[in-house]
Amino acid sequence: MSEPVLAIRGLERTYVTAAGALTVLKGVDLTLNPGEIVGLVGPSGSGKSSLLHAAGLLEHPNAGRISILGTDCSGLPERERTRVRLAKIGFVYQFHHLLPEFSALDNVAIPLMIAGASRKAAEARARDLLGELGLKDRTHHQPAQLSGGEQQRVAVARALANSPRLLLADEPTGNLDPQTSGAVFDSLYALARSQGVAALVATHNFELARHMDRVLALKDGGLEPWTPE
């Protein structure tokens, strides 16, 4: 059996607020296998973003173990956590966060060049990804010249530019109308599937969640299977 891309055990996350300690994750366990696309649902404030941030090594949980491709990342120094994020993890957020002064091509190529690719190789990879996402004729457009759906597809291409093994998406279609939302999700799904990426996708859109391999719900700090009503 293939090694899990992501294995989380006993994850706990507590925040200190003016009203006192607020625990949003209580001993969460989660495993993602290669090529698996898993949805994450739950009301606002249930801890979806906290779980994604911990899985992506952006935040330190209060307790628990996070392993990526068999390596326990929980106690790694920050430099090593950054290296793992750059090489193994891609992120897509609700807001695209594209660099406004650069073209779609540049926005996708820049992470590749940061990782050490030559400009020529980075631009070739960026063109391929943008083409797969239906943006072949938009590569030289700046974000302000693109529609919301096109901007988010550029963000998807950027997230997958360095061929990550794990894709973490936090409400990737939450800022789009239903029709555009479906088109962007289909693009994300098809590209992640074709590259064998394990994906964890937080969403409020139950219709999109129905198309994922499985869906988990965050409730009272824990994960449980979600089934459509």
Image (cartoon, grey):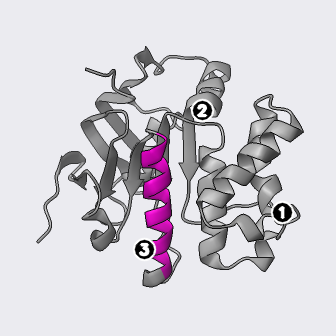
Q: CA distance from mark 3 to mark 2?
A: 28 Å
Amino acid type of disc 2? Answer: Arg
Instruction: Check disc 2 and report its element: helix, strand or loop.
Output: helix
Residue on which the image places disc 3? 182
Quadrant in which the C terminus appears: bottom left
In the drawing, does residue 101 fall left or right of residue 18?
A: right
Report crowding for label 3: few under 14, some 14 to 19, many 20 or more residues within 10 A (C-alpha). Answer: some
Q: CA distance from mark 1 to mark 3?
A: 24 Å
**Foreground: 131 or 161?**
131
Q: Are marks 1 and 3 in contact (CB under 8 Å)?
A: no
Report crowding for label 2: few under 14, some 14 to 19, many 20 or more residues within 10 A (C-alpha). Answer: some
Which span of residues is magenta-colored?
180-195
Question: Which x, y percent locates residue 183?
Answer: 48, 73
Residue on which the image places disc 2? 85
Q: Nearer the viewer, mark 1 or mark 2?
A: 1
Q: CA distance from mark 1 to mark 2?
A: 24 Å
Residue on which the image places disc 1? 103
- Residue at screen point 59% across, 45% down: 160
Q: Quadrant of residue 131?
A: bottom right
- Residue at screen point 69% across, 61% down: 97
Q: Is residue 148 above or below residue 193?
A: below
Instruction: Check disc 1 and report its element: helix, strand or loop.
Output: loop
Q: Is residue 65 above or below residue 128?
A: above
Q: Quadrant of residue 207?
A: bottom left
Q: Are marks 3 and 2 in contact (CB under 8 Å)?
A: no
Mark 1 or 2, nearer chain start:
2
